Image (spheres, rainbow, N blue to C red):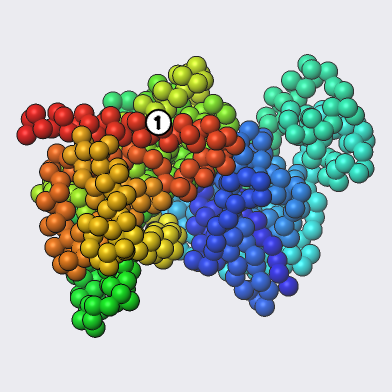
Amino acid sequence: MVISVALVGNPNVGKTSVFNRLVGARQYVANWPGVTVTKVEGATTWKNETLHIIDLPGTYSFSSQSVDETVTKNFLFYAPPNVTVVIADSINPEQSFYLLIETLELTSNVILAMNSIDEAKKLGIKIDKFELQKHFGIPVVFTSAKTGEGINELKDLIVDVAKGKYNKKVIFDYEKYENLISEIENKIPDDLFSNKRYVAIKFLEGDKEFNDKLHEYIEIEPKMLEETQQNIPTIRYSHVANAIKEAYSGKSLNIQRTINDKIDHILTHKFLGIPILIFIMYLVFKFTFEIVQPLSDFLDGLLSSLSEYVNSFGNNIFITLISDGIISGVGAVLVFIPNIFALFFALGILEESGYLPRAAFVIDRLMYKMKLSGRAFISLLLGFGCNVSSVMSTRGLPDEKERIGTILASPFISCSARLPVYIMITSIFFPNNKAIVLFSIYIISILITAFTAYFVNKIFFKGEDVPLVMELPRYRIPTFRNLMIYMWNKGSHFIKKAGTIIFMASIVIWFVSYFPSHGEIETSYAAYLGKLIEPIIKPLGFNWQVGTALFFGGVAKEVIVSTFSMLYGFAEQDFTTAKLALSNSLTPVSAYAFLIFVLMYIPCFATLAAIKSETGSWKWVVFSVIYSLSVAYISSFIIVSIGNLIF
């Protein structure tokens, strides 16, 4: 028997951590049909049953104001799973219980998992499980994603609920509106909706989807509709307050709030918040680019030795393809795997600890100047991993103008694909100042992203203001297990690209650089291509090899490293001398200009495809290409012009 299980919860309650406890790394990510909000699924076996678990997008309610809320609501309403597990925060339960009430109205076979129970115990907070079961009418389990407490009990409950052991229908009393709810239920056609009570309640809350479908059947006075929209949530919160009053004892919940408030007073301070954020990000880059560098150097030496070993078998075309094409091309990118994983490890700490939402709050004042919100900052922050993810995540933004502005600004966030280029160039030209140079690149990335967002909103959307409304989660100590899963799930994407896109691109680049002159790079197809581009980029201090690398980098930015490795490494057949050859083609000034050009010029093909998919228009794709190339060229030209005057 396969039991489908949906995990529901507010953002930052540990829902994904519980999911990881249930299925570990045995998970896969896909898109919901018709939208690009991702769904994470996994499976595990328990008591001879297969549990197919879906980690639904985090949401505070089912108000359908964002695509995350709509996706979660529609999944539970139109394709209900066998079991729904609502993950609640034991220390901050109000919003979780509100979502639980909405879930109970929406679907049956619900389990309440009170997560972070270990932290509640440490704070002296006592929770009466049986009081919660009495108030909500469903089975309750105490869990800790950090320690694994209650996870097996949760699996037991899932199997029991799926087999019908708990099937009590829970109905919450909406007091004076009950008669009105019943009247609306009676007017809903039988063939339109099966869960008429839920639809009637959402109609009274002003849910656009249901209002559009029911307006021809139901008429209600605007004044009454305005009253129900205000009072129904209030009644739910009164249920929540009563449940907490009866079930909670011991130390007050205000203790944790006091601790959070004291930390937030510093980290989100009006004047100190942004300098602290900049310092934290600097430490992240310091760790990413310097602390783990010995691992990259070791991998570099290992691949160099492998290339030399393969070359020892001869000098025929097949050996050259393996050594100079595949090993040098793919290997030149793989040496940066430690740096990529280190970045995601550091970002995982910030996310797991609860700091990233604070970063959004801190940066919101600046985002407001750009006519964006701190919510858009979260989408942009995903761009440090991959611009495609950043563009896709904008589906969670409720305002269409803010969404388009964020999409067009996203490609300027420096993704992990650019990291190998940065590290290679800084290692050659700025060996004693790598962290500072890299940090400056990321600061420029943020500034040009901000400028682009402001420019797009000012020119196309007349700069309408977008407010930020979000709940800050509790601070948590990240667990090593969750950090490893987070790092692997994010970083493995880079390895997959190395085995597919970069592998194929390396073979193509080897072909155009080897033929028609059988290894004579100066007369190869790659040289012809680069020399066509050279007159355009020569004012920037770039030669034809750089032009060729930039051309192929349009496919994926990591390919720039592969191209350089092959264009400069044929004669010497090792990475070290290839790097020395590159240092003879660029000056430190033009090398820095090159870094800026790589940061800003045309988004990779995958990002352009995502822009087309999200905006539904080629207009924005063309704008992104022309705008990014123009900004990259002008910025690099300014750097070269000023740099040559100074140095």
Which one is nearer the viewer's eye here, 499 or 291? 499
When asked about the image quadrant of residue 93, the answer is: top right
Crowding at dot 1, Cα within 10 Å, few <14 / some 14-19 / many 20+, comes out as: some
Residue 643 pos. (x, y %): 13, 32
Residue 245 image offset from top left, x and y in percent: 61, 41
Residue that mark 1 sits on: 627
Q: Is residue 124 visible?
A: no
Q: Residue at x 62, y 58 (%)?
A: 54
- Give residue 493's position: percent from left, percent from top: 43, 59
Which picture quadrant has residue 526?
bottom left
Residue at 49%, 57% (x, y): give it: 17
* Amino acid type, callout 1: Tyr
Residue 636 is at least partly visible in this image? yes
Describe the element under mark 1 as helix, strand or loop: helix
The residue located at (28%, 58%) in the rendering is 524
Q: Quadrant of the N terminus?
A: bottom right
590 or 298: nearer the viewer: 590
Residue 135, image x, y percentages: 70, 47
**Residue at the bottom extreme?**
313
Which residue is pictured at 29% across the width and 51% down the height? 528
- Left/right of residue 28 with respect to residue 348 in the rendered view: right
- 217 lies left or right of 230: right
Figure check: 407 above or below 556: above
Q: Would you place residue 158 above or below residue 631 in this image?
A: below
Q: Please indicate whether residue 293 sits to the left or right of residue 409 in the image.
A: left
In the image, 537 versus 111, the foreground residue is 537
Q: In the image, is residue 266 above or below residue 18?
A: above
